[in-house]
Amino acid sequence: MLNRIILMGRLTRDPELRHTQTGTPVASFSLAVDRDFRDKTTGDRATDFIDVVAWRATAEFVSRYFAKGRMAVVEGRLQIRDWTDKEGNKRRSAEVVADNVYFGDSKRDAEAAGTYAPPSGGFGGPSGGYGGPASYPAAPPPAAPAGGYGGGPGGYAAPSGDQFAGLGDDDDELPF
């Protein structure tokens, strides 16, 4: 059996982060997703408003880095829930349980739309594969290449603090 869904749309509200009684984070939000076709009479595209639920690290990721109006790509599964409302009526809801959430726009586009808040540190990749500076150890400086063109006059120089190599003006000594 296969139950897989991929959506791309804009958040209709800020994600709401809660915790279960056992402390598991859960975030709920809604996506406005335009349909691919236009209405023949009006020429407008219909929009579906789809409820999404994210759990654990994905929930924390979404609540920290997404806000109303931000474009998101959600990958997950469709889930149907039966529940009883306050008046005792039986209800049924469809929602997407998100496995991964990705940015659907660039930081620049989000800043222009006023929906981007700079992160306050790094974040790991289990909920969409985005890693910030605090997620990975610092990369070691590159080693000087072997092969006879290191350090000579006009040749390749080992990277300095800015990690760019200087090349001389003589094209005959280029390393490629």
Image (spheres, rainbow, N blue to C red):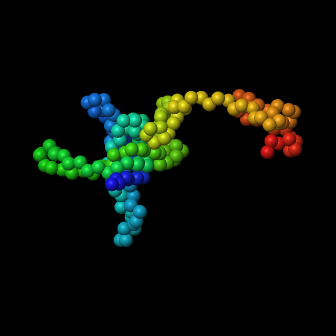
Report the front residue among 121 and 111: 121
The answer to whether 50 appears left or right of 122 in the picture is left
Taking the spot 44% from the left edge, 38% from the top edge, the residue there is 126
Tell me the quarter of the picture where residue 141 sits.
top right
Can residue 86 be seen by looking at this rendering?
yes
Quarter of the image with the N terminus is bottom left
Instruction: Specify the farthest residue to the left.
Output: 88
Is 105 on the left or on the right of 140, as rendered? left
Count the marks: how many?
0
User: Where residue 113 appears, x then y in whole percent?
Assistant: 47, 46
* Foreground residue among 64 and 21: 21
Give the residue displayed 43% in from the left and 49% down from the top.
73
**Residue 100 spot, x, y in % from top left:** 42, 44
Can residue 13 be seen at all in this image of the molecule? no
Quarter of the image for residue 84 reads top left
Quadrant where the image shows the C terminus:
top right
Q: In front here: 121 or 2?
A: 2
Residue at the image point whose x is 82% and y is 31% from the top: 151
Can you give x and y, in whole percent of width and height, for residue 47 in the image? 36, 58
Residue displayed at 14% across by 43% down: 86
1 or 83, which is in the foreground? 1
* Residue 56 placement (x, y as % from top left): 36, 35
Residue lying farthest to the bottom in this orientation: 41
